[in-house]
Amino acid sequence: MEPAVANIVDGLQAAGLIRGAETPVFQPLAGGVSCDVWKVDTRDGPIVVKRPLPQLRVAAEWLAPVERGTSEVRWLKRAASVDPRIVPEVLAEMPADHAFAMRFLPDCPVWKDELVAGRVDAGFAAAVGQSIAAVHAATAGSASDQAMFATDAMFRALRIDPFLLHVAAKEPALAGALEAMAADLAASKVALVHGDVSPKNILVGPDGPVFLDAECAVFGDPAFDLAFCVTHLLLKTVWRDDERMRQAAAALVDAYHAGVNWEDPAGLAARVGRLTAALLLARVEGKSPAAYLTDPKHIAAVREQARALVAAPRPVGALVADWKRTVA
C-alpha cells in the first residue's frame, strides 16, 4: 500500500469509517484529471474518497495547489445548507492529504453519460440551472462566504490562466478581449462559485441534480458557473449533431435567470455570454481541450463561432439561440 493511501486508511479509521483490523478495498474511479478518486468498500458499505493531485493529468503542464480539496469540502457543506439534496454528504476530512470521504450514491448516473447515450432531458437541465442559481442567491453579498472562499490563487491556477490567458497568448487578435475578461473575473466578488459545473460533475439523482468536484470553488462571479455549463452543452450540440442539446442549454439558461435576484439579470446575461464565448474557444485552444472533439469539422465549427463571439459578444440567451451545429 502506497504511503498516501496508508494515510487515508488511518484517517478513515480515526473517523470511524473503518474499524480495527479491517482492510478496505480501494477501487479507482475513472474520469478525473485533477484528483485520485476511489470507491472504498468497507464492512458498513461503500464510500467515496477523493484526493487532489498537484499535477493535473493533461498534456500541457498544469500545476495546482492541493489545498483545493479543503475548498471543495467547504463548498459541499455550504451548498448542503442551501439544499441538502444537491450534494453528497461529507463523511470525513483528512487534512494531511487534503483528502475527504463522502457518501457513495448508488444508481445515480453521471449526466454526461446520459447525454452521450442520447437521453437529453431539458427538464433536468432546467433543474441544474435552478440549483446553481439557488446557491448563488443564498451566498450573494455574504461577507462570511467571501472570507471562507478567498481562494483566488487556486481559481486563477485552475480557471483563469488555462482557460483565458493561455488562449490569449495563442490568439493575438483576441488577446485584449480575453485579458479584459480575465481581469474582470479575478476582480469580481459577487457570490459563491462552484467553478466546474460540467455534465461530468453532475449526477442524476432521485430528487434532481447532485453536484460534485467543487475544487475550483471561489467567491467570485456567478456568471462563470452558468457559462461553464452552457459551454459543455453547446460543445455536445456540435459533437452529437443533436439540436436537443442546444434546447437543454436554453432551458438551463432560462431556469437560472428565473432565480437571479441579486443583480440586474441583463448585465449578468451579458457577462455569461462573453465568458461562454471565451470558454468555447478554450475548449479547442486551451490547456484542457474537449477530448471528444476530434473531428476537424467539429473543431472548426466551435473555433469559428467562438472567435466571432469573443470579438462581438452577445447575451447568453441570444448566443444559445443562434448556436450552429455546423458552419459552411
Image (cartoon, rainbow, N blue to C red):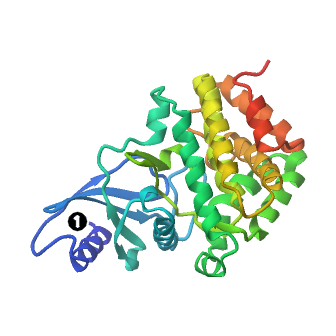
Give the answer, above or below, for where 134 lies relative to 78.
Answer: above
Q: In the rendered view, would you say 65 is above or below 212?
A: below
**Badge 1 element:** loop
For the question of whether residue 23 can be seen, the reply is yes
Q: Residue at 37%, 45% (x, y): give it.
A: 206
Q: Left or right: where does residue 20 sit relative to residue 4?
A: left
Q: Quadrant of the C terminus?
A: top right
What amino acid is labelled 1 in the image?
A: Met
Q: Quadrant of the N terminus?
A: bottom left
Residue 10 horizontal side relative to residue 87, left or right: left
Which residue is painted at 78% across and 49% down in the image? 269
306, 134: nearer the viewer: 134
Q: Which residue is the extreme one toward the top? A: 328
Give coordinates of residue 123: x percent, y percent.
Answer: 54, 37
Q: Nearer the viewer, residue 92 or 6?
A: 92
Q: Residues within 10 Å of mark 1 (few under 14, many from 20)?
A: few
Asked whether the viewer can see residue 195, the reply is no
> Foreground residue, 270 or 13?
270
Residue that label 1 marks: 1
Instruction: From this view, report whether residue 219 is shown above or below residue 42.
Output: below
Q: Answer left or right for 89 relative to 140.
A: left
Q: Estimate the x, y position of residue 250 in percent, counting from the top left.
A: 67, 36
Q: In the displayed structure, does residue 234 sit left or right of residue 68?
A: right
Where's residue 14, x and y in %?
A: 24, 80
Q: Residue furthest left?
A: 21
Name which quarter of the figure residue 85 lies in. Answer: bottom left
Q: How many marks?
A: 1
